[in-house]
Amino acid sequence: MVFASRGGKTKELLPIIDICKKKKVTILSITENLDSPIAKNADIVIKQHVNRETDRYNSQGTTSSTSLCVIFHTLQTALIEETGYKNEQFALIHPGGAVGERLNK
């Protein structure tokens, strides 16, 4: 289970941690706040650091959400390489759309 929260205190996520721990799910946290409840309860913590959001009020999650996408894409690429995941496996779970059509020829 992956938790991504800039401050790591998102109230709606906190109850899910207990459920994950009971089910022995590995918890990965991506947050700026290493002292947050989410980070402290995670098995793996990735620190995200954003100096400023791009809007004039520094309040919209533009920079932080873009940074998070980069982190997730990097993790996905690393997992594909590490596990030897193949297009044939992806085609089974992604049969529709242009990608599914290309993979299932």
Image (cartoon, helix red, strand yellow):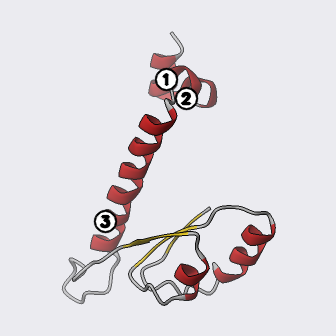
Q: Secondary structure at mark 1?
A: helix
- The image quadrant that residue 22 belongs to is bottom right
Question: Please, what is the three-letter code of the amino acid marked with disc 2?
Answer: Phe
- Residue 80: where, in percent of width, then height? 46, 37
Residue to which mark 3 is pinned: 67
Q: Look at the picture and state if 93 lies above or below 39.
A: above
Q: Nearer the viewer, residue 90 or 29?
A: 29
Residue to which mark 1 is pinned: 87
Residue to which mark 2 is pinned: 90
Category of crowding for the residue at label 3, using alpha-carbon neighbours closer than 10 angstroms: few (below 14), some (14–19), many (at least 20) = some
Report the residue at 57% width, 30% height from top. 94
Q: In this image, 10 relative to 35: left or right?
A: right
State which tag comes first along the sequence, 3 or 2: 3
Category of crowding for the residue at label 2, using alpha-carbon neighbours closer than 10 angstroms: few (below 14), some (14–19), many (at least 20) = some
Report the residue at 47% width, 43% height from top. 79
Report the residue at 41% width, 55% height from top. 72
CB within 8 Å, label 1 to label 2 = yes
Q: Nearer the viewer, residue 71 or 81?
A: 81
Which mark is drawn over residue 62?
none
Q: Secondary structure at mark 3?
A: helix
Question: Please, what is the three-letter code of the amino acid marked with disc 3?
Answer: Ser
Gap between marks 3 and 2, in whole Å?
25 Å
Report the residue at 50% width, 25% height from top. 86
CB within 8 Å, label 1 to label 3 = no
Q: In this image, 41 relative to 69: left or right?
A: right
- Residue 69: where, in percent of width, then height? 37, 58
Residue most extreme to the top = 105
Question: Please, what is the three-letter code of the amino acid marked with disc 1?
Answer: Asn
Gap between marks 1 and 3, in whole Å?
26 Å
Q: Secondary structure at mark 2?
A: helix
Gap between marks 1 and 2, in whole Å?
5 Å
